[in-house]
Amino acid sequence: MTTPFPNWHDVCPQLAILEARFREIRAELDAVRDGPGWFPWVENDLYDSDVDWQILPIYGFDKLNVDAARALPRTCAALAQVPGLRTALFSRISPMGALNPHLGPPLHSNFVLRAQLGVDVPGEAGVVCDGEERLVEEGRVLMFDDLLLHTGFNRADRPRTVLICDVDRPGTPPLKLERPQWGVTAPDWPPGWEEVGRRVTAVRARAFAAGLQALTPGPPAAPPPPARSPSRRA
């Protein structure tokens, strides 16, 4: 039996780092909100033409948006401390906008739960999941089960932006490493996407936990010494 709004403290208590780093995350959002890298959510049947739903992807399974990550080092440092992180992105809905009720794709949502940190919430905004409404607050994490019928809304007169994080659903086998749906259906990846590891754990260990230092190009590796020919006896 599932619940529309699981207690994130029980599911993934490490999400508390996002609340603790809220001011830093907000400052980095403010710096990139008018920059490149945002694009409309590709499943445009989930929202009407008068609604503008934009996302800035940061991380998806074994891929990191390097351009975004370099602009968001403190946000990524916080995300690095969230175990079982599968996706992370900023999500912005236009003023007085609402998404059409929809279900998360089972191949994804059966394995994860969705959390969102309110980063820029200028008024009443939130989520309706399985008929129950919850408001999102700035600096606070809200978790919901997007396997259930749900929608997001913004009743404010300015855009609302949250940081979405999908984390492993308790009691399920690990989600297979594959591109998230918005990556598969997008015409192409936003600039800066590149492979940074074959497994999620490798990405966290080598890139996130190192404060993205692993993404800084270093000097080329020295070529291996030539193999020695076997000596011949006279």
Image (cartoon, rainbow, N blue to C red):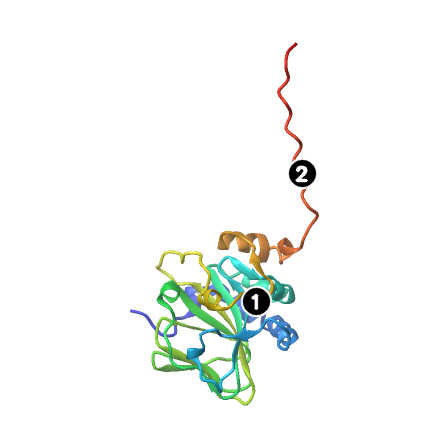
**What residue lies at 46% left-to-right and 81% top-to-bottom?**
126
Is residue 24 visible to us here? Answer: yes
Q: Which mark is residue 107?
A: none
Q: Amino acid at mark 2?
A: Pro
Q: Which mark is residue 190?
A: 1
The image shows residue 53, relative to residue 83, as above or below, that is below
Percent coordinates x, y for residue 139 in the rendering: 54, 76
Q: Where does label 2 land, which residue?
A: 223
Q: Amino acid at mark 1?
A: Pro
**Crowding near the residue tagged with mark 2, few <14, some 14–19, many ≥20 C-alpha atoms within 10 Å:** few
Q: Along the polypeptide, which appears first: circle 2 or circle 1?
A: 1
Residue 210: name its quadrant: bottom right
> Residue 137 or 97: which is nearer the viewer?
97
Residue 29: name its quadrant: bottom right
Percent coordinates x, y for residue 108 in the rendering: 39, 64
Percent coordinates x, y for residue 16 in the rendering: 51, 67
> Residue 68 or 25: which is nearer the viewer?
68
**The N terminus lies in which quarter of the figure?**
bottom left
